[in-house]
């Protein structure tokens, strides 16, 4: 089969890396890809939002199957556009991708179908939102309704902070049109876990658990980022919790989407929090998480392409998905100053040396090639994934890899995987 993967980050590098292991995949293209992906697939200079160009490319090159990695094209209706042209594609249609692209929609869905989540209110009027805030207890959470590169969620400890955040979102348009409508929700406490799942519209099969580190600095200090590292499996998510989540969250979500005539085919990512009142949904995503994918897919034993095709064909209940009984830890190497301002164009060294290292995989996020050398071209540059029998072993392997790879102003956290729960 000829495969086209759409996207350019560490998530897409991991997807390409895993698909390449499938005996069904003869040739893989990636649009637009990155320097690391170009080592495994043929990169095509077409942007993820250039639907017409992607469709033309798929037709001209007889692409058998297209895999959408990113949230923006899914929210924009890329799956609908491909299907309209008779092209086979992996991912939810636009009316199902709304599960991620509108926080207000997903909260209303959970309320309607009794799926456990934090209590909330939705506002598109600044004055009404401000008045509501003044009656709430702190801390409180403000969420931009639309997609905001994983940065549209603000936890405010004081009323003053909350009012300032509200002003930035709704008046100053810090997150562009994503903040025209906002969700104000109660602050919940407890450890978080990410459960990604395969879904064919009716059957849902959760993957192995993962936990991520969102803050820029050690001990969860600093600004929220797209993710500074992740580990799998979770340290607190038990089989009993998984069974309960299947009954109260996972299957009810899929069933709710069917009832709303929004059948979901692809990946549903459940961001969950274990509170004093049990497990609650913090957020949904409509695609693989980044960097969670970098620890989940290396643990997958079953052919990823076979699973994806089963999702598209509605035959997920006929497939047995197996996982390795091991652990994985991914440490993100970022550009100094990320997530605010950072410089690009620094030469990356140590990649040839780390390639010889056992149980270590390097996934590229923000890299490019110049004069035959790898250079930095984004905020998150590389993900160093270590595999081990235990989390401790995987941490050690990942950080040994971190020492080998270098570039100017390299920034990383030193405590990935070391959460107690």
Image (cartoon, rainbow, N blue to C red):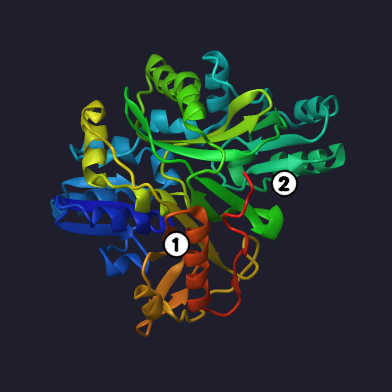
Residue 105 point in image, percent of width and height: 53, 25
Image height of 230 relative to 275, above or below: below
Q: Which mark is residue 399?
A: none
- Mark 1 or mark 2, which is nearer to you? 1
Q: Which mark is residue 386?
A: 1
Name which residue lies at 33% across and 38% down. Answer: 91
Horizontal side of 237 relative to 296 (left or right) equals right
Query: Label 1: how many residues lie within 10 Å, few (<14), some (14-19) or many (20+)?
Result: many
Horizontal side of 337 relative to 135 (left or right) equals left
Residue 68 point in image, percent of width and height: 33, 46
Image height of 245 relative to 341, above or below: above
Q: Nearer the viewer, residue 238 or 267?
A: 238
To which residue does mark 2 refer? 172
Residue located farthest toward the bottom when viewing the structure as drawn: 371
Tell me how far mark 1 sits from mark 2, CA to CA: 42 Å
Query: Label 2: how many residues lie within 10 Å, few (<14), some (14-19) or many (20+)?
Result: few
Residue 260 point in image, percent of width and height: 42, 17
Total number of numbered discs in the rendering: 2
Q: Quadrant for the C terminus, please.
A: top right
Dividing the picture into quadrants, the one containing residue 7 is: bottom left
Name which residue lies at 41% across and 21% down. Answer: 251
Q: Is residue 328 visible?
A: yes
| SS at circle 2 | loop
| SS at circle 1 | strand
């Amino acid at each position: 089969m000829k495969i086209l993967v759409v996207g350019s980050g560490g998530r897409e590098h991991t997807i390409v890396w895993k698909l390449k292991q499938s005996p069904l995949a003869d040739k893989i293209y990636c649009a637009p890809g990155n320097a690391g992906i170009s080592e495994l697939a043929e990169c095509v200079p077409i942007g993820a939002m250039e639907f017409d160009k992607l469709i033309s490319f798929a037709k001209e090159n007889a692409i058998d199957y297209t895999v959408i990695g990113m949230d923006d094209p899914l929210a924009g209706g890329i799956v609908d556009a491909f299907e309209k042209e008779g092209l086979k594609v992996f991912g939810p249609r636009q009316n199902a991708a709304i599960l991620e692209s509108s926080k207000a929609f997903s909260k209303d869905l959970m309320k309607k179908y009794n799926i456990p989540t934090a209590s909330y209110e939705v506002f598109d009027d600044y004055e009404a939102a401000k008045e509501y805030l003044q009656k709430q207890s702190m801390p409180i959470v403000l969420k931009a309704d639309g997609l905001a590169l994983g940065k549209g969620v603000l936890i405010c400890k004081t009323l003053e902070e909350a009012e300032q955040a509200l002003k930035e979102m709704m008046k100053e348009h810090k997150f562009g049109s994503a903040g025209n409508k906002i969700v104000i929700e109660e602050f919940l406490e407890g450890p978080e876990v990410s459960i990604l799942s395969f879904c064919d519209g009716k059957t849902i099969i959760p993957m192995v658990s993962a936990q991520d580190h969102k803050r820029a600095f050690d001990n969860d200090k600093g600004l929220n980022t797209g993710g500074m590292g992740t580990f799998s499996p979770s340290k607190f998510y038990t089989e009993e919790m998984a069974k309960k989540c299947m009954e109260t969250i996972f299957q009810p979500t899929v069933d709710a989407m069917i009832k709303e005539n929004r059948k979901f085919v692809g990946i549903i990512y459940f961001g969950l929090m274990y509170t004093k009142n049990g497990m609650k949904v913090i957020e949904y995503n409509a695609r693989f998480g980044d960097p969670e994918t970098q620890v989940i897919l290396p643990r997958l034993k079953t052919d990823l392409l076979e699973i994806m095709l089963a999702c598209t064909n509605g035959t997920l209940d006929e497939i047995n998905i197996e996982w390795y009984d091991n652990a994985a830890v991914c440490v993100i190497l970022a550009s100094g100053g990320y997530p605010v301002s950072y410089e690009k164009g620094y030469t990356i060294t140590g990649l040839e040396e780390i390639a010889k290292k056992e149980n270590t995989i390097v996934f590229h996020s923000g890299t490019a090639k110049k004069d035959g050398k790898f250079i930095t071209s984004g905020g998150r540059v590389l993900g160093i994934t270590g595999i081990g029998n235990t989390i401790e072993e995987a941490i050690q392997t990942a950080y040994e890899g971190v020492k080998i790879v270098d570039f100017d102003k390299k920034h990383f956290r030193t405590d990935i995987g070391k959460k107690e729960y």
